[in-house]
Image (cartoon, rainbow, N blue to C red):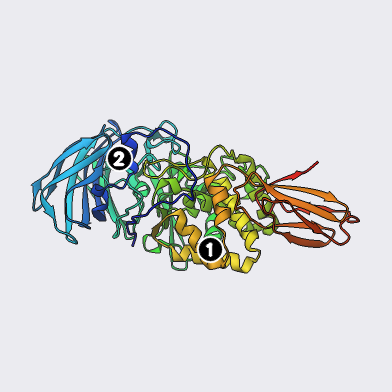
């Protein structure tokens, strides 16, 4: 069950740049009483998609429990979408007030604490069209090579309320899942999350495709995929695997998916625990954009190529033996879909861990040295433009460094812990402990500290809340090595490993200069600071 959290966000004393945020931002990102007074239990979405008019019409039945007595709740729907009616079986037609994309629903009397209610939210309109999905939110309306409609949607960050009425906050997911019923023109199929329940010819030129989700689900993960799909399937013990691809790609899809999907699932389940949504199965669904981690219905649009659109984002060549979109987007099933951040300011919990799953897959298939090469290659993509953590309560992400710097942080923590048995057990336990929960950065840090019996807080602080990469300054004088941390917070105390000759020594630098005498150091023909195990800069002092 994914519970709402009321959390005092403590940013370790570090302020954020004074960005200007609007009332619209706080309406979408904030947790005011109109949101915290109710807990969503289930969504039942029933819509029609008209491809010619690029229009959606229908309703969402929203079932919720009143956490506190209230006469007003906040739902969300983009203001370009039209509300037809909001009603409840007992109260009848409900009044509402729209402000920006927020919809404040008014009840004639106070809702009773712990009681369950269902409202029907009827609407229609032309949803926002994405210019460059999935990097901007919206619908994509394309045609396949046979001239048939090929439709998808991606709304992470922008918000699920772009296309259906919802409590548009990551702080609350429907505890008992959702149903998604989508009518599309005859000859097309809709694929959504969860298990297929059947289709019904409505007799008006449309067929409705029904899907059922048993698990809690991110609202931005609820999806539609419309096309002339061909379906084929596979399985692992206790896991059904389904594929929905364009008819023109059916044969090459079978060969392409066979190479990566089962090895990936075996790797991820061994490192992170059993696939979290086995009740809903796992699907790859061909999409008219690059990809998105829609829970149990991962959108795939990498055009059956290895790497990322045929290239390796790490720049090392290591990433060219697998399909990046399959690996990365499926990694989100554990990190993002199962373990979800309460606020998108903490989206590194999704993206940093998921980017690290790529390295984990490389290690499963190619070994430690290849994984180390791959993860360090990602450093070229780190910009250090601003902190990874964003501004809370205003629907604001932090730096895009949440991907690669987040992954490199995890690689760093692995080598700080310096015990691979403990590291892999920590990752496994983390995935299982927070399975299907909504969490915060503070909870991640506390868990890592508890499980390792180490104070890792200064390391998390440095990499997440500042844009500064630690610099290890050193100087060799005879048999003496002088060293200290630069460009760090005053309490930063991360260890680092060095090698000279065949000896490996662990140093414990601080912001104050330290010295160590090393036997045979002067005569050693080789000297190395392991900056491939720790994401740091190395500076030799004059």
Q: Is residue 272 visible?
A: no
User: Which residue matches tag 1?
Assistant: 449
Q: Is residue 255 left or right of residue 114?
A: right
Q: Residue at x 59, y 48 (%)?
A: 489
Mark 2, other Cα within 10 Å: few <14 / some 14–19 / many ≥20: many
Kind of element beneath mark 1: helix
Residue 418 location (% of width, % of height): 66, 64
- Camera-side residue: 65 or 266? 65
Q: Residue at position x 57%, y 46% from top?
A: 404
Q: Is the residue marked by circle 1 packed among few (<14), some (14-19), or many (20+) residues within 10 Å?
A: some
Secondary structure found at label 2 = helix
Residue 169 appears in view? yes
Disc 2: which residue:
27
Say whether disc 1 or disc 2 marks the residue closer to the N-terminus: 2
Q: Quadrant of residue 315?
A: top right
* Residue 481 x %, y %: 80, 53
Residue 166 image point, x, y percent: 27, 46
| Horizontal arrangement in the rendering, residue 253 relative to residue 392 (left or right) | right
Residue furthest to the front: 512
């Amino acid at each position: 069950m994914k519970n709402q959290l009321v959390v005092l966000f403590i940013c370790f004393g570090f302020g954020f740049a004074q960005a200007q945020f609007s009332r619209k931002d706080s309406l979408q990102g904030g947790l005011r009483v109109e949101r915290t007074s109710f807990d969503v239990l289930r969504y039942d979405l029933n819509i029609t998609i008209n491809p010619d008019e690029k229009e959606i019409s229908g309703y969402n039945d929203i079932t919720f429990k009143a956490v506190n007595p209230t006469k007003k709740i906040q739902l969300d729907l983009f203001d370009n979408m039209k509300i037809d009616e909001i009603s409840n079986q007992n109260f009848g037609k409900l009044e509402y007030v729209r402000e920006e994309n927020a919809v404040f629903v008014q009840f004639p009397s106070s809702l009773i604490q712990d009681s369950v209610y269902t409202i029907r939210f009827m609407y229609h309109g032309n949803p926002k069209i994405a210019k460059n999905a999935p990097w901007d939110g919206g619908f994509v309306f394309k045609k396949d090579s046979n001239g048939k409609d090929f439709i998808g949607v991606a709304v992470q960050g922008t918000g699920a309320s772009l296309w259906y009425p919802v409590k548009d906050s990551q702080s609350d997911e429907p505890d008992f899942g959702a149903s998604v019923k989508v009518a599309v023109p005859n000859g097309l199929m809709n694929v959504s999350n969860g298990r297929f329940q059947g289709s019904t010819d409505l007799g008006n030129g449309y067929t409705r495709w029904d899907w059922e989700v048993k698990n809690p689900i991110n609202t931005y993960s609820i999806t539609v995929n419309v096309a002339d799909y061909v379906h084929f399937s596979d399985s692992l013990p206790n896991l059904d695997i389904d594929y929905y691809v364009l008819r023109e790609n059916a044969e090459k899809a079978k060969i392409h998916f066979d190479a990566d999907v089962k090895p990936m699932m075996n790797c991820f389940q061994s490192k992170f625990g059993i696939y979290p949504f086995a009740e809903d199965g796992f699907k790859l669904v061909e999409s008219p954009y690059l990809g998105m981690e829609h829970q149990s219905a991962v959108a795939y649009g990498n055009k059956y190529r290895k790497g990322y659109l045929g290239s390796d984002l790490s720049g090392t060549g290591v990433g060219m033996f697998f399909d990046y979109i399959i690996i990365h987007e499926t990694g989100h099933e554990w990190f993002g879909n199962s373990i979800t951040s309460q606020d998108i300011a903490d989206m590194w919990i999704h993206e940093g861990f998921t980017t690290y799953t790529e390295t984990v897959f490389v290690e499963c298939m190619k070994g430690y040295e290849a994984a180390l090469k791959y993860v360090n290659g990602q450093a070229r993509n780190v910009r250090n433009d601003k902190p990874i953590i964003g501004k809370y309560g205003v629907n604001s992400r932090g730096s895009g460094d949440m991907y690669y710097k987040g992954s490199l942080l995890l690689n760093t923590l692995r080598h700080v812990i310096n015990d691979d048995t403990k590291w892999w057990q920590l990752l496994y336990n983390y995935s299982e402990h927070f399975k299907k929960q909504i969490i915060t950065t503070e909870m991640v840090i506390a868990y890592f500290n508890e499980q390792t019996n180490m104070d890792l807080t200064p390391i998390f602080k440095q990499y997440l809340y500042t844009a500064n990469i630690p610099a290890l300054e050193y100087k060799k004088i005879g048999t003496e090595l002088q060293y200290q941390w630069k460009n760090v917070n005053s309490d930063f105390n991360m260890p680092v490993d060095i090698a000279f000759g065949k000896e490996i020594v662990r140093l414990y630098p601080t912001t104050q200069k330290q010295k160590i005498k090393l036997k045979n150091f002067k005569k050693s023909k080789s000297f190395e600071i392991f900056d491939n195990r720790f994401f740091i800069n190395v500076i030799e002092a004059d």
